[in-house]
Amino acid sequence: MGGENIKIIAQNRKARHNYQVDETYECGIELLGTEVKSFRDGKISFPDAWAEVINGEVWLRSLIVAENPFSSVFNHAPDRKKRLLLHKAEIKRIQRKVEEKGYTLIPMSFYFKKGRVKVELGLCKGKKAFDKRADIRERDVRRDIEREFRHGIR
């Protein structure tokens, strides 16, 4: 992501711990007006959100967008499934990977780009417990080495 006017709304930090992210895609997201207002206020929750391909379209599930208190009658359903906007070729490629190789589609982050809400969709594989432990061990070792290096300089 370059420096072209991007404002991050929310990031899924746990996703990189729980999944191995192989590829990411930038998607538009089809929203209602009241949902955009909730996105602007950062009133979204997606601890176990995921996406699926249905009839050549990608749908985001379990993303909770809080209702806007000021738009009473025309409010959206907080857990409505939302269509993600991708190119047909990208959708075909994603569908192949999900069906053949057992990948899962997980939203990694939500951000505004040129005033539009975008989703960074990760093509992920679940990590096993020992993978997570290995990652933690690797991070600890790297931290120790950096600490030794810093003390060695003084």
Image (cartoon, rainbow, N blue to C red):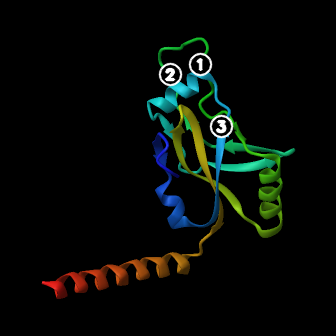
Q: Closer to us: mark 3 or mark 1?
A: 3
Which residue is pictured at 54% across the width and 76% down the height? 129
Q: What's under tag 1, amino acid-wise?
A: Asn
Residue 29's tag is: 3
Taking the view exactly as shown, the residue that stands out farthest to the left is 154
Q: Position of residue 42 (x, y in %)?
A: 45, 35
* Residue 48 vertical placement versus 98 (above, below): above
Q: Secondary structure at mark 1?
A: loop
Dot 3, crowdedness within 10 Å: few (<14), some or many (≥20)? some
Q: Quadrant of the C terminus?
A: bottom left
Compare residues 45 and 86 and report the one nearer the observer: 86
Q: What's under tag 2, amino acid-wise?
A: Asn
Are dots 2 and 1 in contact, CB under 8 Å? yes
Q: What's under tag 3, amino acid-wise?
A: Ile
Which residue lies under the disc numbered 1? 75
Q: Is residue 146 left or right of residue 81?
A: left
Q: Quadrant of residue 31?
A: top right
Looking at marks 3 and 2 on the same chain, the residue that comes earlier in the sequence is marked by 3
Q: Secondary structure at mark 2?
A: loop
Looking at marks 3 and 1 on the same chain, the residue that comes earlier in the sequence is marked by 3
Which residue lies under the disc numbered 2? 68
